[in-house]
Amino acid sequence: LCWGPHIDYLTKKLRSIIGALCRIRHSVPAELYQKIYSALFESHLAYGISVWGVALKNKSSDKLFITQKHCIRILFGDLEAYFNKLSTCTRAKPYDLQKLRSNF
């Protein structure tokens, strides 16, 4: 069996849920974030994983993992740092800030 199309479909569905979460997170109390994550996001990941979870040994699982990390950063992490690539990605930093210093 080939699980690639299912993983692509699931990734697309989870990304649309992330878009909805981005739009509603400011109007929902932070105490409900974990319940919302479990209900809207994690339930799709867990459904039937005993059947299609074998496909996660391949590289195609990276898409799901990255999508899950994105959702968790939006709800529970530092979203401003996530969107500010200068503070999260070394390659995007100015050259002077990439140099190693003695006080690191």
Image (cartoon, rainbow, N blue to C red):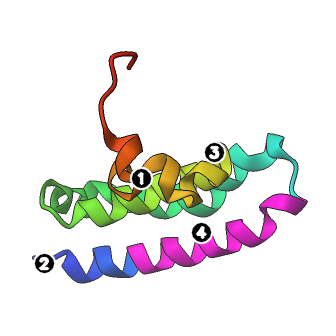
- Give residue 58's quadrant in the image: bottom left
Q: Position of residue 89 (x, y in %)?
A: 40, 51
Query: Mark 1 or mark 4, which is nearer to you?
Result: 1
Sequence-first tag of 1 and 4: 4
Q: Which residue is mark 1?
A: 93
Instruction: Classify mark 1: helix, strand or loop.
Output: loop
Sequence-first tag of 4 and 3: 4
Check if mark 2's residue and mark 1's residue have beta carbons within 8 Å: no
Instruction: Classify mark 3: helix, strand or loop.
Output: loop
Sequence-first tag of 2 and 1: 2
Label placed on residue 103: none
Q: Position of residue 102 (x, y in %)?
A: 33, 17
In the displayed structure image, the side of residue 15 where residue 66 appears, left or right: left
Sequence-first tag of 3 and 1: 3
Amino acid of disc 1? Lys
Q: Which residue is mark 3?
A: 78
In the displayed structure image, the side of residue 80 where residue 55 appears, left or right: left
Amino acid of disc 4? Ile
Report if residue 38 is visible in the image.
no
The residue lying at 15 percent from left, 62 percent from top is 59
How far apart in space, not on screen, are marks 4 and 2 (Cα)?
26 Å
Label placed on residue 18: 4
Sequence-first tag of 2 and 3: 2
- What's drawn in magenta, residue-wise? 11-27
